[in-house]
Amino acid sequence: MYKVIKTYLIIITCLFYAAQNAVATSLESCEEVKIGVVDFKELWIGLSAVKNIKTDLELTLKKAHQEFSEIESELRQENADLLKLANEKIKNSDASKLDKKRDSFERKIITVQKKAEKRQKSVNTAHAKAIKEIKDTINQVIEKIAEENKISIVIYKENILYHSKSLDITPMVLEKAENKTKNIRLHVGGNDG
């Protein structure tokens, strides 16, 4: 029995050393894996293009609000005039005049609603396009930095629990992305009709 146990121990020891040598050999043949970490929130807050787009969006919405407030005021006055006319005792010949005014008023409301929808769609499209352009540029910058620095994997900080500060490439990405995105603005088209 002692010989059987001794034989098993020798076999296990040999297997252990063989496995250890195999792991060491495979590790020697592997290239070093470098990891980079990017803090997307810091990057997004730091880019002037993001601030510019936010400012452009606020100004565009403020301008649209002013324009549509003026139109709304005009429509309210026209509606009040229609109600006043309808409440007056009118002759049958004037009824057709009132109907025409109501029809005209309803067409104006529909036109204004369509214009507002078109404007909102235009703003949304321009905003989405600008944001996509920034994100695409950030990704290109990250890829280029990874290639230049032989980084195998780049992970957003938001997706990991802990990382060494030495892995953080955010300042490098921010600097290069800023140069490539600083002229990106919100361009809203189709303000007419």
Image (cartoon, rainbow, N blue to C red):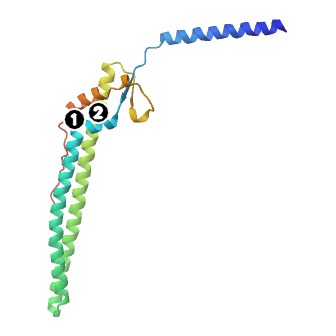
> Quadrant where the C terminus lies?
bottom left
- Amino acid type at circle 1 is Thr
Q: Would you identify the image quadrant in which residue 13 lies?
A: top right
Q: Would you identify the image quadrant in which residue 149 lies?
A: top left
- Horizontally, residue 162 falls left or right of residue 86, namely right
Sequence-wise, the earlier of marks 1 and 2 is 2
Percent position (x, y) of residue 168?
35, 26
- Say which mark, if any, is on residue 138: 2
**Would you place residue 117 above or below residue 140 in this image?**
below
Percent position (x, y) of residue 40?
33, 35
- The answer to whether one can see residue 24 in this image is yes
Front position in the image: 128 or 149? 149
Give the class, few, some or many, for how many residues have Cα within 10 Å of label 2's Cα (few <14, many ≥20): many
**Would you place residue 176 above or below residue 60 in this image?**
above
Percent position (x, y) of residue 80?
18, 80
Front position in the image: 166 or 129? 166
- The answer to whether one can see residue 100 in this image is no
Q: Secondary structure at mark 1?
A: helix
Residue at position x 16%, y 86% from top?
Answer: 85
Give the class, few, some or many, for how many residues have Cα within 10 Å of label 1's Cα (few <14, many ≥20): some
Asked if marks 1 and 2 touch (Cβ < 8 Å), the reply is: yes
Q: Secondary structure at mark 2?
A: helix
Percent position (x, y) of residue 100?
17, 81
- Horizontally, residue 4 falls left or right of residue 36, namely right
Q: Would you identify the image quadrant in which residue 52 lies?
A: top left
Front position in the image: 36 or 28? 36
Residue at position x 85%, y 9% from top?
Answer: 1
Q: Residue at label 1?
A: 181
Between the C-alphas of marks 1 and 2, the distance is: 9 Å
Residue at position x 23%, y 52% from top?
Answer: 123
